[in-house]
Amino acid sequence: MTTTQRFSQAPPDKANDLFDKLLGTSDNAVKTRERLLGDLKEELELLATLQEEHLFPVLSRHGMQDLVREATADNQQTAALVGELEHMPKNSSEFTEKVAELRRAFQQHIRDDRRELLPAVLKVLSDEEANAIAETVEDEMANIDEMKRAEARRSREQGEAVQRVTEDVADTLRAGAESA
């Protein structure tokens, strides 16, 4: 895969999947909406952070502050829309309208990045430097995914341990009641 393909095929897939799931919920699915919005917020923050840590410095070093300002404004707009969603009631059509607005803004930002930001980065970097950045971003995303899986595993194991203790206590109480 070429460097250009690696950059242009990067991360919005997971965010788009979360948008689809969130927009597919009913007004009664408040808890599901809250969970999906939290996941979406986390994903959008990750994408912005990766951009800020790995692409913005390259652009800044090569005098492309205008692109950095535009992309930063896009990230701030996305964060502001997410903030509005967090404070809205999750059981209304206004919520899904705001999610749709966020999705349109996010997809426009991705198009802008692919049309302006990424070509600018690829223009100023050698293939070797661009590949190194792409590998770093891929490694960071893999590490984050692994940490999430480990946290989910720990949480599941804790839940199972609590369930076992609860069952043991219930068994002890039943045995005590039966012997009495």
Image: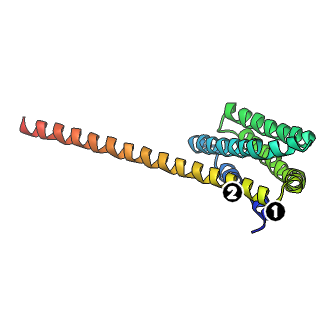
Q: Quadrant of residue 178?
A: top left
Q: Residue at x 32, y 44 (%)?
A: 161
Q: Is residue 148 left or right of residue 110?
A: left
Residue 138 occupies which quadrant of the picture?
Answer: bottom right
Residue that lies at the very extreme toward the bottom in this rendered image:
1
Between residue 75 and residue 118, name the one nearer to us.
Answer: 118
**Above-or-below relation of 141 to 56:** below
Residue 22 pos. (x, y %): 66, 49
CB of mark 2 within 8 Å of CB of mark 1? no
Estimate the spatial distance between the alpha carbons at disc 2 and disc 1, rounded to whole Å: 13 Å
Q: What's under tag 2, amino acid-wise?
A: Glu
Where, by quadrant of the figure, is residue 81 drawn?
top right
The residue tagged 2 is 135
Residue at image position (78%, 40%) is 78
Q: Is residue 49 left or right of residue 145?
A: right
Q: Which residue is mark 1?
A: 4
Question: Residue at position x 17%, y 39% from top?
Answer: 172
Above-or-below relation of 153 to 94: below
Instruction: Assess disc 2: are there few (<14), some (14-19) or many (≥20) residues with their C-alpha within 10 Å of its C-alpha.
Output: some
How is the model colour-coded? Answer: rainbow
Q: Name, please, the residue furthest toward the left.
A: 179
Q: Position of residue 82 (x, y in %)?
A: 72, 37
- Look at label 1 and name its amino acid: Thr
Rendered-image quadrant of the N terminus: bottom right
